[in-house]
Structures are given as structure tokens and as C-alpha cells.
Image (cartoon, coloured by chain):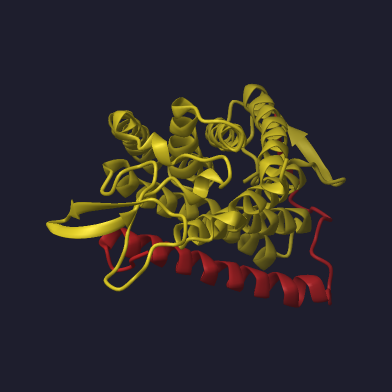
Amino acid sequence: MAIQTKANSKSHIPQNSIFFEKIVPIALITMGAITLGLMLFAAGVLLGIVHF
Amino acid sequence: MTINQVLPFISTAIMLWFTVDVFQRYFVRRNPAFLFWGIGLAMFGAGSFAEAYLSLAWNKWMFFVWYLFGAALNAAWLGHGTLYLLARKKWRHVVTVVLVLGSLFAGNLMLQAMPKLDEAVFTTAKPISEQYGTKALDAGETAPSGALTINTTYRGEEVTAVRGLLPLGTSVRLTTPFFNIYGLLTLVGGAIYSAYLFWRKRVMPNRVIANVLIAAGALAIGSASTLTRLGYGEYLYLGELISAILMFVGFRMAAKPQPDEVVIPNSIPASAD
């Protein structure tokens, strides 16, 4: 069995929440940038561009 | 015992709990995403246990487990579980075949490397993450004090290298970036994408937070592994512990029903990645 949301779910992100309006988007963008950086680093190691 | 000897045992215990929890969900729901997550978590736990063991004593098969499952494969298998929630069916099957064959290939390369291990350099005084690789020194670069060095030929050049357990140019080390890039892209990218979808639709705040925690947990181990590659291996065990806690909490939050959710048999979860 699995979980499925009702079409008219009441589980909504609260209005005017600083956490969801500011912190979550900043966290997602930051983590995306770090992920990209780590992937480029790994690709650099693979291609011999980055020496360590 | 030092803190670096205790941390891997704590991570192992958390990962064991986490693995059992995910496999239980797989046996109830039969969703392949949970199967791949469970396999990835089992690999993570096995790697943590091997790391803990190697902080106390040497065993070459524990090193095999640590490198293959802990350093090379676990992120890719974890991420593959997320791919099952997000990608189209035909792509899932193709990538599954590539992942399984690639993992077998890496395992075979690791087996071939086993007789060549430089076991004389092993010490329990340093984390395994700081002594597994042989590092060629650049011109003018000096070896750290107390490090064992070797003069050898590498890529047609005479080089001085700081000795590690795996010799210079060991093929299995070339496979790890492929697995880790795939793992980062699917595990972190998938969690960020899921969080963004829920956030954009303004629904399921618990799953927004859960996916942020999963992404942060995966990034914690990814960043710690990168620091290890750069010579700062002392942060790896802390990174693993943080990763285990964040991903476990995130997974439990994502899988927890909301008060206004209904349970429908044989349906696909909105997201439990």
C-alpha cells in the first residue's frame, strides 16, 4: 500500500512563511550549485584536468 | 578509542536501522525504488562497518568492502532508487542494466587489485580514507613528514609517490567518478527536483522539507568524500554520520502519511525519495 494525496488536500505550504518563501528556495539553489561543483570536480578528476 | 574510531560504528548502527526500514517497505509495497534504496543503504552500512573495523585492525577483505561498496558504488545505487520514482519506465530498465554491469565490472577490477595492495603502509593511527591511495608528488612537492615514499614509473615518467594501499594507476579508481557523478545527479538532483515540484505546487510541506534533508545528507557525504580526495580525510566519518542522520530523518518524513492523506492500495507514492 502506498500514500496518495487527495485531490483537495488541505496539506498546503503555509502562506507568508519565511521558511518556505526564503530559506527553502535559497537552500535548493545552494545545494544545486554545490552539486554542480562536485560533479564538475569529479569530471575534472576523471578527465585528468584536476590533480590532487 | 578516538572519536574517528567511534563515529563509523554509530553510522553503521543508523544505516542498519535505515536499511531494515527501507527493505520492510519494499516487501510491503513491491516498489523497485525501495529495493535500490535498500541495496544502496546496505552498501553504505557495509562500508561504514568496514571503516570502523579498519580503524582497529587490518583485513584486506574489509578493505575490499570499504572501497567497493563504501567509496565506489553506494551513491549510485541510492540514486538509482530515486531515478525509479522520476524517470520513464524504458530508461529505468536501460540504466539498471548499465548500473548492474558497471558494478560487476568495478567489482572485478577491485578483485584484480587485491593481490597488489601495499599492505605494509597500513596503520590504525590514520583513518583508512587517508591511506588508501598512492599519490604522485608534483615537481618540487615534498612528502609529508613520516610518509612512506616510492620511486616508480607512472604514465611514462619517473615520479616519487607517497605510498598508499592501492598502487598508482589502479584501474578501479577510475570507475569511482562515474558512479559518484551518477549518484550525485540522481540522488541529490532527484531530491532537489522533488522538493521543487512540491514547493512550486504549494503542497506537501513535509515532503519539501524531507527532500531538502535527503539532498543535504547526500551532499554531506559527497562533500566529505571530495575533501578526502583533496587530502582532508579527517572529515569523512563526521560527514558520513551527518549524512546517515539527515537522510534517515528525511526518508521517515517523506514516507510519513499526512493527516489529510488517504491510503490507496497498489498506488505509486507521490515521492518517498
Chain letter corresponding to the colour yellow? B
Number of dots carrying numbers: 0
Residue at x 68%, y 27% (from the top left corner): B20
Which residue is drawn at the image coordinates 59% and 52% (left, top)? Answer: B236
Q: Nearer the viewer, residue B48 or B179?
A: B48
**Chain appearing in red on the rendered image:** A
Identity of the residue furthest to the front in this view: B146
User: Which of the pair B25/B226 is nearer the observer?
Assistant: B226
Vertical order, A33 against B254 (above or below):
below
Kindly give the residue lying farthest to the top in the view shown: B27
Q: Quadrant of the N terminus of chain B?
A: top right
- In this rendering, the answer to whether B80 lies above or below A10 is above
Q: Which residue shows up at 30% across the image and 73% down it?
A: B140
The answer to whether residue B13 is left or right of residue B235 is right
Image coordinates for residue A38, horizontal then vertical, percent? 47, 64
- The residue at the far left in this view is B156
Residue B174, x across and y down, in percent: 30, 49
Quarter of the image where one finds residue B111: top left
